[in-house]
Image (cartoon, grey):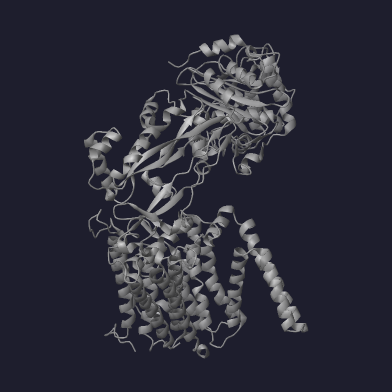
Amino acid sequence: MRKAKNIFANIDSVTIILYLILIFFGWINIFASQYNDDTQFTLDFTTRYGKQLYFIVISLISAFIILIIDWKFYYSLSYIFYGTIIISLILVLIIGGVAGGATSWFQIGSLKFQPSEFAKFTTALALAKFFNMQHIRDKKITTRLFSYIIILIPFILIISQNDLGTAIIFSAFILVLYREGLSINILFFILLFAILCLLGLLINQKILIYVFSFLALICLLIFRFNKQDILTIILGWGLSILLVLGTNYFVYEVLSPHHSQRIDILLGKEFDPYGAGYNLIQSKIAIGSGGGFGKGFLNGTQTRFDFVPEQSTDFIFCTIGEEWGFFGSLIFISVFIGLISRIILLAERQRSNFSRIYGYSVACILFVHFTINLGMTIGLLPTIGIPLPFISYGGSSLLGFTILLFIFLNLDSYRLEILR
Amino acid sequence: MRKHQKRYQVVLSLFFFVSFIFLIQLFRIQIVNDDYKFSANNNALRYDVLTPVRGLIYDRDSNLIVSNIPSYNLMVIPREVKEMDTLNLCKLINIEIDLFQRKLDEIKEYSKYKASIFHKQIDYKQASKLQEKLFQFPGFFLQTINTRKYTTKSAAHILGYLGEVNRKKVEQDSYYNNGDLYGVKGIEGGYEKDLRGKKGMSITLVDVYNRKQGEFQEGKFDTLPISGKNIYSTINLELQKYGEKLMKNKKGAIVAIEPETGEILSLISSPSYNPEELSGRKRSKNFQKLLSDKNKPLFNRSLSGLYPPGSIFKLLNGLIALEEKVIHKNKSYNCNNGFEYEKGKLVKCHPHKSLVNLEEAITISCNTYFCKTFTNLFKKHKTTKEAYNNWKSHISSFGIGKWMNNDFVSGAKGLLPEHKYYNKYYGRTSWNSSTIISMAIGQGELLLTPIQMANIAAVIANRGYYYTPHIVKSIEGKQEIDSIFKTKNFTTISPENYDVIINGMEKVVKHPNGTAHNISTEKLIICGKTGTAQNPHGEDHSIFIAFAPKERPKIAIAVYVENAGFGSTWAAPIAGLMLEKYTNTENNKTLEEFILKGKITE
């Protein structure tokens, strides 16, 4: 049990150390991406590395405050946090400012507040509390539906802000639900659905229909025209074709031309050397030029002369790849995976559903960020602008991830006290 | 749910699986693949932007108006500048040596790494000489830019001009780099995205001395520039030139529209300038000169000039009264030389026979008739607010008081006040139709732009609808222009109510007592309306709107001449000559001579 006198005795030091390593490493790389001998080294608000240092200090102070507050604070106010964020997400749609095509922030004085950044941890808290209040073996369909709704409301609101990147992060909760017993079949269907939609856009529809028909025929032969199977196979065949045609119809007829064009660029069907395509070539060149051991700190050329756009935010990994090489990247990836694996292990040792589910949410949100950001930078996934947690430049994102992580560390430190 | 405890292993495996895939990909591009190894011998990549040719502009009969002559900017990347024969370079571009150092320092201040313009607008001859010796000056390179060349001295306001992007624009739109030109105003501005084309890029490997080592990956990532699209404008260049000639030494505007399509046939703002003046090296100097000219040649009066409409507004008030059934087409009123709207206060009218019907009231432009109609229109409603809002919604259906949504980047929306405006000005209950009686005859707070006035003529010519006026007929390689230019905008007035108004307009010119009888001709039936707007700052403005011929109108026009007195003296003859020119009708030589000689501005 956590005693008032040694508040920090039960806090997991491994996680904290990994966290500190990451933010320090992140700052070094922001510095490298911004610094050149044009400008003097100045630690003030005129430079991004100066500002980031300030954000780091604020985040550390916030982390400390989060740790000393009693866990019941987060537990009992979960729904209130959630409700507040939902209301601000609605408000931002009505009166918010527009940045990069997305309506996502409020401006209060010179401060920009982006509610979607905080929707992640509030949704995680609300979901955790919801499952905690349910009877563990309650398998009623309404319970399940309700948990989906908790996730879907912020997801839909963020989609309406045109902020696809942030909305995709909510797919992290699928993994959380999986751990809590979501049927594998549902996961399988979600995956199948996504693959069919993608195939429908990428491959000629006629060819797809032939392929589906051919597969259906083979299945029919294998199952020897068993009555029940015939129905299933024909249904599956029909639905797949409908899905393929429907996706195409939606993207090219319902959406406006510039949205369809953006999707085409994302899918690589259209090459735009000054847009998404340009970023991709540049970031691959930068990372590739790093080689095995990298060019060394401050010696990168590709990332420093504005070749790579967004080099201190979404494309920060370019700097890591170029200056620290393959081995540097390997170490970075290991530290990051180490951190999220550690969180999963900590989550598993919780006695309460609340803490465990929250812990899983933290790990999975970080994991999805990591996957999409790195996947995009090294050319495996389409360009979706989301930050690399703890590394990318940006105050809201660093503070958001810090809050996300440290609430869990707080819950973990009380693990002997929170029983259910 | 404890029973799913084993699932954490699946989640962890997923983490490891994804990072494993990433590491394989990193291993591939960082260690296995040789394509990116150029860094080993300290090489770098150089990105050369290939500038596309800017789209050409034609008039409605496919006569070329605007084309390009290649010219160049000398760019510099200060970081790459090495020891060199500075004097030689200065000679080649004709600048003083101390200016050279000053310029370079200034650029360094901004950035050592980004390319900035060192010397602007070098012509082809000078550039080819320079190109041969450019290898002696590391850090300097030539960037192609499109300098516009014109086949005409007119239409400057329609065409717009090219300006240099500023640093803010470069930050906002990733298409632009320092030194690029972009369209400002007119067709150049409104259709910038079509005209500019797509840039190409070639990536080459260079060594530390910026010497080419070869193409990067055999040019796999290179792209060719795609030329901008050619644009066919709606203007009739002949008519445009003629109009500018007629407007010489006068201030004002002419807008001519083809009512059937909403295509702008000519758009004249006087005084104007020669488009060539804002092209190439001499732009900044000439721009300053034009900007400080007291007659404001850069100000596009046809789109942004805000003017009281004067008596041409009686046409609309007549239409509204018919639609609201306040009068029928034969309704007559006594004039009595004026309308007493409050005790002892009179809107004066000029002497003419006393009892007039609607048609005659338009022909002779009777003030009393329209004041009485306006008053009765307001009496029909319970409150002033209701009456005013009803009137206002009729007026705004003609496109007045709002952006016309045309394809120009600049313009004004005019002024059609909200009823709140009067509440604030006079107090909620203390205003009524008498207070704003000047609206009946187009004075008062109302302000219209000449293009809105021409649109009124087009609406009447069409008997009740208009197409949003636009300046581009077609864009090469595009199926259609914006659908808003293909949509009819209907007014709130039923088509049958237009007949009596049109007959009145015909008599304005045809009837011996008509206010514009001076321009009548047997060969063309012109329907028009004069206007004379009182101007508290000086001489009255002369106004005329018209369309011709009466049946199947081909052209609708508005002419506005500032400080020129009666509508019949200047605006009507100019409009008449324009209509005759466009319909190929023989024109009245004496009137033409009178107009060409006329000089109203000092």
Q: Residue at x 55, y 30 (%)?
A: B64
Q: Residue at x 61, y 67 (%)?
A: A199
Left or right, A247 with reference to B495 = left
Q: Residue at x 38, y 82 (%)?
A: A342
Residue A370 image position (x, y, % from top left):
43, 72
Say above or below: A99 vs B323.
Answer: below
Q: Residue at x 58, y 57 (%)?
A: A260
Residue B274 image position (x, y, % from top left):
46, 25
Residue B357 shows up from this direction: no
Say above or below: A223 vs B456.
Answer: below
Residue B496 shows up from this direction: yes
The quadrant of the picture occupied by the N terminus of chain A is bottom left
What is the quadrant of residue B30 in the picture?
bottom left
Q: Nearer the viewer, residue B461 or A305?
A: A305
Q: Residue lying furthest top in this view?
A: B590
Residue A37 image position (x, y, % from top left):
24, 56
The quadrant of the picture occupied by the C terminus of chain A is bottom left
Q: Nearer the viewer, residue A234 or A50?
A: A234
Please state the total of marks drawn on the protein image. Answer: 0
